[in-house]
Image: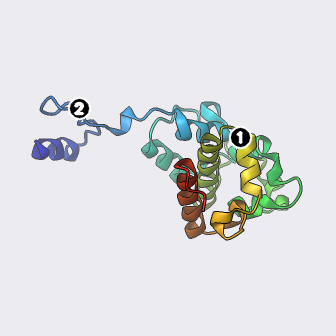
Amino acid sequence: MATLRAQSLAEGSNDASDIGGQHTITNRDVDAGGVLGNAINLLGGEKVFGRHINSRLDVHDMIALGLPAVALRILVGELPFLIEKEDLLSVAVGVSRESFYQYVGGPDVKLGVELSNRIWKFAETMASASEVFGSKEEALGWMALPAIGLDQRRPIDLFSTAAGQEVIEEYLTRIEYGVYT
């Protein structure tokens, strides 16, 4: 059966869902709800992307093409704390407050892949934190306060590196399962 599945995938099918009568999860089965859907919504949803995003492969393709600049504007509109008190936008996604205002181009303006990736990762983590803490407001508060399990560092301050982002994800998972240190 594994050979049939591999052959089906090698022939270009993304859907090996019913080989040998056994259902396997495919990229098309991923629902855009939960963290994935919430992250997409933080960036403006289908209206901004012009299509339905329903898998991690769709997210990859979207990032590889560059997010629309308007997605960054919408993210800041959803999370105004990023530019209100201090320049947290620079820490979170690598764009200073001053540069942010340059990204307010029309709907066809695309961001670079690296910036798109950082914006996506931040939106995804915010969506995950919102699920763990029960609301976007609680997640925002958590992002801005020192955390015991992060050696008294604020989660937002760890977004400047991939390693820091992994630490945040691991910490959120620990919190979700009741391990706070």
Of residues 27 and 13, the one nearer the viewer is 27
Residue 22 percent location from the top left of the image: 18, 32
Q: Which residue is mark 2?
A: 23
Residue 146 drawn at (x, y percent): 74, 63
Q: Nearer the viewer, residue 59 or 146?
A: 146
Tell me the quadrant of the picture where the N terminus can be found: top left
How far from the left and from the top, in percent, is residue 61?
48, 47
Using the image as rendered, state which of residue 95 and residue 149 is in the foreground.
Answer: 149
Q: Amino acid at mark 1?
A: Lys
- The residue singled out by tag 1 in the image is 136
Lower sequence index among marks 1 and 2: 2
Categorize mark 1 by other alpha carbons within 10 Å: few (<14), some (14-19), many (20+): some
For the point 72% across and 55% down, which residue is it? 143
Whether residue 138 is visible here, answered yes or no, is: yes
Tell me: 49 left or right of 32.
right
Around disc 2, counting alpha carbons within 10 Å, would you say few (fewer than 14), some (14 to 19), or many (20 or more)? few
- Number of the label disc, if any, that sits on residue 56: none
Marks 1 and 2: which is nearer the front? 1
Is there any visible trace of residue 112 in the rendered image? no
Q: Nearer the viewer, residue 39 or 57?
A: 39
Q: Which secondary structure lies at badge 1?
A: helix
Please tell me in which quadrant of the rendered image residue 95 appears.
bottom right
Looking at the picture, which amino acid does disc 2 mark? His
> Height in image: 158 above or below 49?
below
Horizontal and vertical percent position of residue 158? 66, 66
Q: Quadrant of the C terminus?
A: bottom right
Between the C-alphas of marks 1 and 2, the distance is 35 Å
> In screen coordinates, is 46 left or right of 13?
right
